[in-house]
Image (cartoon, helix red, strand yellow):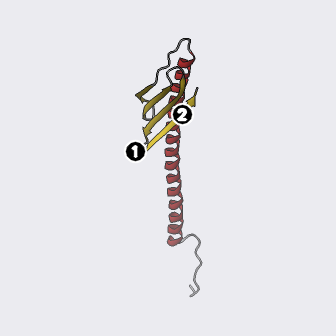
């Protein structure tokens, strides 16, 4: 055999390790992105549920006002609603001048999975 080096084909261990490092960084980024998407989807679902609760309460109050002979009564009510993704506190504040309704404010509050307080508020005037 001569002193000439024999050229071998294939990848060296260093090349394989670098490729594995690049691949693992990419997979970690994809996993973090998936976790962020899941959190954002949960927050969107909670906001949607809160908005549906607030809209429902507002429509109930509007139906009460338009009913025949409905007395104008100023009131503040608060109730807790257990829903699919969170526990919501629904507060309804009705403003009345003694003769007719002036407005209603419905506030829905809840804590998200991180413990941050969130709220949705709907205000209407009659």
Secondary structure under the numbered disc 1 in the rendered image: loop
Q: Residues within 10 Å of mark 1 (few under 14, many from 20)?
A: few
| Residue 20 vertical position relative to residue 44 in the rendered view, above or below | below
Residue at image location 40% in from the left, 45% down from the top: 115
| Residue 42 vertical position relative to residue 14 in the rendered view, above or below | above
Q: Which residue is mark 1?
A: 115
Secondary structure under the numbered disc 2 in the rendered image: strand
Residue at image location 56% in from the left, 14% down from the top: 67
Q: Earlier in the sequence, mark 1 or mark 2?
A: 1
| Residue 63 vertical position relative to residue 106 in the rendered view, above or below | above
Q: Quadrant of the C terminus?
A: top right
Locate residue 4 relative to residue 87 in the image: left or right.
Answer: right
Residue at image location 49% in from the left, 21% down from the top: 98
Q: Which residue is mark 2?
A: 122
Between disc 1 and disc 2, the foreground one is: 2
| Residue 17 vertical position relative to residue 100 in the rendered view, above or below | below
Residue at image location 44% in from the left, 31% down from the top: 91
């Amino acid at each position: 055999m001569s002193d000439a080096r024999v050229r071998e084909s294939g990848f060296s261990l260093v090349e394989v390790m670098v490729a594995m490092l690049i691949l693992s960084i990419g997979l970690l980024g994809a996993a973090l992105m998936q976790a962020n998407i899941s959190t954002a989807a949960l927050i969107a679902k909670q906001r949607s549920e809160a908005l549906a609760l607030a809209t429902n309460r507002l429509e109930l109050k509007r139906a009460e006002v338009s009913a025949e002979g409905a007395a104008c009564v100023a009131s503040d009510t608060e109730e807790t609603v257990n829903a699919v993704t969170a526990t919501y506190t629904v507060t309804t504040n009705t403003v009345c001048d003694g003769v007719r309704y002036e407005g209603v404010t419905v506030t829905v509050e809840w804590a998200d999975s991180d413990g941050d307080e969130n709220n949705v508020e709907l205000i209407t005037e009659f």
